[in-house]
Amino acid sequence: MDSVVWITGNVGCDVEYRTFGDDVPYATFRVASTPRYRRSGEWVDGETTWISVTCARSLAENVRTSVKKGEAVVVVGKLRTNRWKDAEGAAQERLTIEANAIGHDLTRGVAQFKRANRAQPDEKAGVAEMVRATETQSGDKHDGGTGGEAAA
């Protein structure tokens, strides 16, 4: 069973972009979410929660172009816990969201949407190439976005 969550916060670092396997685009960044509440008539910041965000394929490409450090974002995806051992052998873990959707938080600013250009299959290409191009564009074959994150 997947735990689908959403979080709002600020992008805490530059987006890291790379490719894996058969040139599958993959992007990661961290989000800082700090609750605010009123105490004795004054606004007070709560404890900041840091979450790693991973995404693949067209979402990764669009995040690389659209999301910058410091921007307010909304992230929706599957909550995961990545576990690994550090150089000294101590157990480490980090919460990660495998993002299905990422956007700017419009309660904190304005944005303008621009549709991404998608490569069109060659008219002379065979059915297999057309199916592969369609799957790539729609993200139907999601790789789970787990490549390399366990060592972070």
Image (cartoon, rainbow, N blue to C red):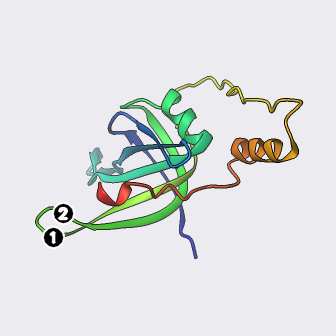
Give the quadrant of the C terminus. bottom left
Q: Which residue is mark 2?
A: 86
Q: Quadrant of residue 148?
A: bottom left
Q: Quadrant of residue 17?
A: top left
67 left or right, relative to 38: right
Q: CA distance from mark 1 to mark 2?
A: 5 Å
Can the viewer see residue 22 in this picture?
yes
Kindly identify the residue that appears in the image at 57 percent across and 25 percent down.
111
The x, y position of residue 30, in whole percent, is 36, 45
Can the viewer see residue 106 in this picture?
no
Kindly identify the residue that appears in the image at 43 percent across and 50 percent down.
53
For residue 63, the mark is none
* Kind of element beneath mark 1: loop
Q: Which residue is mark 1?
A: 90
Kindly identify the residue that appears in the image at 58 percent across and 76 percent down.
1
**Is 120 or 59 nearer to us in this picture?**
120
Q: Residues within 10 Å of mark 2 (few under 14, many from 20)?
A: few
* Above or below, comparing residue 143 to residue 131 in the picture: below
55 left or right, relative to 138: left
**Contact (CB < 8 A) between labels 1 and 2?**
yes
Q: Residue furthest left?
A: 88
The x, y position of residue 14, in whole percent, is 35, 33
The x, y position of residue 69, in whole percent, is 37, 31
- The kind of residue on which mark 2 rests is Asp
- The kind of residue on which mark 1 rests is Ala
